[in-house]
């Protein structure tokens, strides 16, 4: 048995916790550089604002309908997510944090009414953090995801599903006829794992709802589409095919890329950006206890600007696998020098770490002087202990005092004055992670 706990319009809800004046107002949270809408309040959805809508196309709604647009505040969202997930863990014995606002909970062995227990946890999350959420319960993860969709939609649109399923929906405690009725009300595109392309193809074959999909023969789905869609069908039929992952699998590649707030032309500014991106990627690499064999660096202009275009990338092979920030940043900046061309307005750059392997897999190298025939072969360890300790110290400082507290010299002095810094003109304070931004209650 599984439950899915999912925050409602999570980014917007985090902002509303500290700015109650935004309640009942149409609100959108914008992506990096205030480009497009990545989160919408129910009121913004009612204005027919689509996910990913460019800000310049919807900004007129600020005047006509009071639309409020905010820059993404990921430090706040990450901290609020940690608080919500810690409370959600009390719902069952196992937990898989699926995304910043979603968490699967394993309910095996939990006694009593699951709906009652879920409502208590939901109420606790709302009271302790101020974040509303929906909870779906079912015998498979796909059905739990679908139950969560029903719970949240029934609360937002009372005429879409029966109101008794609002906030918490348990598909395991109802009759087969009632469950089929709910699946019949759900478009096939809302099923986890279907997506736009599959949804369009399924509709061409007369499969319009989740109920239609659940009644298909799995072997036919596998032969006509894929094993992945077959698994989705089996999960809709009540056969668990996807289990709880207590530990997320290691990433096969790690990337840090950013669009710039304004065009960047100088190599020195690009070097600062690439050094910073390499530092962040290296920190993620150490967090999952991996080493990288290759470093990819890329730069490109904006395809949306009517000016001369340039895009180039280069992959650098490291002498030996490592997670050392200095080594990785040095490789990335050397790659940058080889692909940089003056006279272009660069809009984006990035660093990717490739060919990853576990950090405990030691790759030794032969350290021998071929000119000295009497020399005894010796093997040098992959990562000197001093470098390991230095990286641990650097990570500890940045974790305690905030990202950017300790930087490589090649990354510059930091701060918003950088030419390549993201455009975040509408960002709210980092209420829970920065001492200067802690709200003050006055009586």
Image (cartoon, helix red, strand yellow):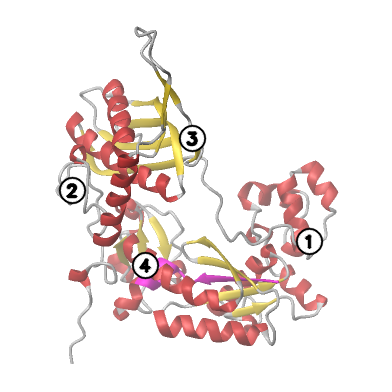
Q: Which residue is mark 2?
A: 414
Quarter of image, res 401: bottom left
Which circle, 1 or 4, is nearer the viewer? Answer: 4
Question: Which comes sooner in the sequence, label 2 or label 3?
Answer: 3
Q: Answer whether residue 366 is magenta in the image.
A: no
Q: Residues within 10 Å of mark 3 (few under 14, many from 20)?
A: some
Which circle, 2 or 3, is nearer the viewer? Answer: 3
From the top left corner, tell me how far across and down residue 238 is, in percent.
78, 65
Q: Which residue is mark 3?
A: 362
Residue 214: give its label: 1
Distance (Cα) linking label 2 and label 3: 35 Å
Question: Which comes sooner in the sequence, label 1 or label 4?
Answer: 4
Residue segment shown in magenta: 1-14
Q: With respect to residue 373, does 156 lie above or below?
A: below
Front in this rendered view, residue 251 or 273: 251
Tag 2's secondary structure?
A: loop
Q: With respect to residue 347, does 157 lie above or below?
A: below
Residue at 66 percent across and 53 percent down: it is 194
């Amino acid at each position: 048995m599984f439950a899915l706990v999912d925050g409602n319009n999570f980014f917007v809800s985090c902002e509303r916790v500290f700015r109650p004046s935004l309640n009942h107002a149409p609100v959108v949270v914008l992506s990096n550089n205030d480009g497009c809408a990545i989160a919408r309040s129910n009121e913004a959805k009612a204005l027919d604002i689509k996910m990913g809508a460019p800000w310049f196309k919807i900004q007129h709604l600020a005047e006509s309908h009071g639309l409020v647009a905010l820059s993404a505040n990921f430090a706040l969202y990450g901290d609020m997510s940690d608080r919500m997930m810690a409370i959600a863990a009390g719902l069952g014995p196992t937990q898989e944090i699926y995304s910043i606002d979603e968490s699967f909970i394993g309910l095996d062995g939990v006694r009593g009414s699951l709906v009652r227990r879920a409502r208590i946890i939901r109420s606790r999350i709302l009271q302790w953090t101020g974040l509303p959420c929906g909870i779906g319960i079912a015998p498979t993860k796909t059905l739990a995801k679908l139950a969560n969709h029903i719970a949240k939609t029934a609360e937002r649109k009372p005429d879409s599903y029966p109101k008794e399923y609002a906030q918490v929906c348990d598909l395991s405690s109802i009759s087969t006829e009632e469950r089929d009725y709910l699946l019949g009300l759900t478009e096939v595109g809302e099923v986890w794992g279907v997506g736009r392309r599959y949804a369009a193809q399924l509709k061409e074959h007369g499969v319009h709802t989740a109920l239609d999909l659940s009644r298909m023969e799995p072997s036919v789905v596998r032969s006509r589409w894929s094993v992945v869609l077959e698994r989705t069908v089996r999960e809709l039929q009540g056969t668990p095919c996807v289990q709880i992952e207590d530990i997320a699998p290691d990433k096969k590649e790690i990337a840090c890329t950013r669009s710039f707030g304004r065009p960047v032309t100088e190599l020195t500014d690009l070097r600062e950006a690439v050094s910073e991106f390499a530092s962040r990627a290296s920190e993620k690499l150490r967090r999952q206890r991996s080493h990288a064999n290759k470093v990819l660096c890329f730069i490109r202009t904006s395809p949306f600007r009517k000016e001369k275009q340039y895009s180039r990338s280069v992959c650098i092979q490291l002498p030996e696998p490592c997670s050392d920030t200095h080594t990785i940043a040095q490789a990335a900046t050397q790659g940058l020098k080889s692909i940089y061309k003056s006279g272009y307005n660069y809009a984006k750059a990035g660093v990717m770490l490739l060919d990853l392997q576990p950090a405990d897999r030691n790759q030794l190298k032969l350290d021998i002087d071929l000119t000295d025939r009497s020399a005894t072969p010796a093997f040098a360890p992959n990562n000197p202990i001093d470098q390991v300790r230095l990286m641990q110290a650097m990570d500890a400082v940045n974790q305690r005092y905030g990202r950017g507290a300790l930087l490589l010299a090649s990354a510059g002095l930091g701060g918003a004055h950088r030419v390549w810094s993201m455009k975040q003109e509408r960002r709210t304070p980092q209420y829970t992670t920065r001492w200067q931004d802690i709200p003050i209650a006055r009586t």
